[in-house]
Amino acid sequence: QVQLVESGGGLVQAGGSLRLSCAASGLTFSTYALGWFRQAPGQERKFVAGIARGAGGTYYADSMKERFTISRENARNTVYLQMNSLKPDDTAIYSCAASRSGLYSRHAYDYDFWGQGTQVTVSS
């Protein structure tokens, strides 16, 4: 059974940083592409960042690529999202997802497995 478990969310002041983690089990982690998405209250889920299988080429939503960094540690079956210079607009539930294709995608429908999400709240 595949499981993705996010951690690292919380309350932070504007300008601060957080590092989210997503620990995976039940899959051959290195062969999967991983993605981070977020959903704010009353809004649609949006792509944040993706990383390909193996060594992992990366891809970001335009508004986040200067502040966010996605990385993976295959030995630990974990993907990370480093978030810097956080803004109140970054407040959302952040979820990780895994894709069998091994290729990162901005589209949620390309991902096969999802975590439950972790809340990030940025105060002004």
Image (cartoon, rainbow, N blue to C red):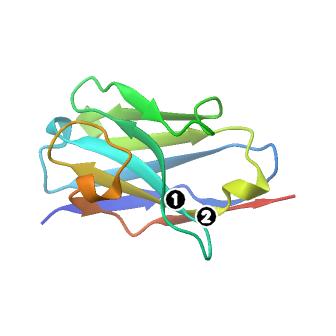
Q: Is residue 105 left or right of residue 95?
A: left
* Quadrant showing the C terminus: bottom right
Q: Is residue 46 left or right of residue 108?
A: right
Whether label 2 touches label 1, CB < 8 Å = yes
Disc 2 marks which amino acid? Ala
The structure residue drawn at horizontal position 73% and vertical position 56%, both measured from the top left corner, is 89
Which mark, residue 92? 2
* Quadrant showing the N terminus: bottom left
Which mark, residue 38? 1
Which mark, residue 51? none
Helix, strand or loop under label 1: strand
Of 46 and 8, nearer the camera is 46
Compare marks 2 and 1 and give the one earlier in the sequence.
1
The structure residue drawn at horizontal position 61% and vertical position 67%, both measured from the top left corner, is 40
Is residue 35 something one can see in this rendering?
yes
Is the residue marked by circle 2 packed among few (<14), some (14-19), or many (20+) residues within 10 Å? Answer: many
Give the CA distance from mark 2 to mark 1. Answer: 6 Å
Is residue 120 something one can see in this rendering?
no
Q: Quadrant of residue 32?
A: top left
Is the residue marked by circle 1 packed among few (<14), some (14-19), or many (20+) residues within 10 Å? Answer: many
Locate residue 28, reporting x and y percent: 12, 44
Disc 1 marks which amino acid? Arg
The structure residue drawn at horizontal position 36% and vertical position 61%, both measured from the top left corner, is 5
Q: Is residue 49 left or right of residue 19?
A: left
View extreme (bottom): residue? 42
Q: Quadrant of residue 97?
A: bottom left
Q: Quadrant of residue 51?
A: top left
Locate residue 35, reporting x and y percent: 37, 46
Of 105 and 87, nearer the camera is 105
